[in-house]
Amino acid sequence: VQLQASGGGLVQAGDSLRLSCAASGGTFKTYGIGWFRQAPGKEREFVAEISWNSGSTRYADSVKGRFTISRDNAKNTVYLQMNSLKTEDTAVYYCAAHPRGTWYPGIGLNQYDYWGRGTLVTVSS
């Protein structure tokens, strides 16, 4: 499966953005999807993830209550709605996929099999 993240941009603190992760080349609904981010000079970190049927979602503590992950399997797309953005949310955001048969909440960055190119989110103060 090929993934492509989009929707990033330059916003001010307090603004909102919605990122999209579009999938092609595979049976999208059979994958758990995660969002990760990497800020300059830092390691890639977990942001949010969602199971193949939206039955399970999980968030990093730093984004809980501000970000919402969702998916539309009919459109082969996962979304990350980001509200109340902070300057520390500035990063390149990536989406990743892992087959549902071995996906579980908290599976971990290194277990995701497929990665898309990231989209840059810059939050100014």
Image: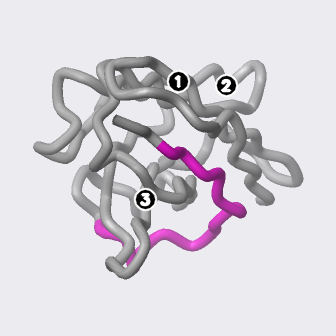
Report helix, strand or loop for mark 3.
strand
Sequence-first disc among 1 and 3: 1
* Residue type pointed to by label 2: Asn
Report helix, strand or loop for mark 1.
strand
**Label pair 1/3, CB-CB below 8 angstroms:** no
* Residue type pointed to by label 1: Leu
Q: Residue at x 22, y 37 (%)?
A: 63
Residue labelled with disc 1: 17
Separation (CA) of disc 1 from disc 3:
15 Å
Nearest to the observer: residue 30 or residue 25: 25
Residue labelled with disc 3: 37
| Residue lying farthest to the front in this orientation | 125
> Magenta span has 61?
no
Q: Position of residue 101 (x, y in %)?
A: 46, 57
Sequence-first disc among 3 and 2: 3
Label 3 packing within 10 angstroms: few (<14), some (14-19), many (20+) = many
Q: Position of residue 57 (x, y in %)?
A: 29, 33
Q: Which residues are magenta?
A: 108-122
Label 2 packing within 10 angstroms: few (<14), some (14-19), many (20+) = some
Q: Residue at x 59, y 32 (%)?
A: 19
Separation (CA) of disc 3 from disc 2:
23 Å
Residue labelled with disc 2: 73
* Numbered disc total: 3
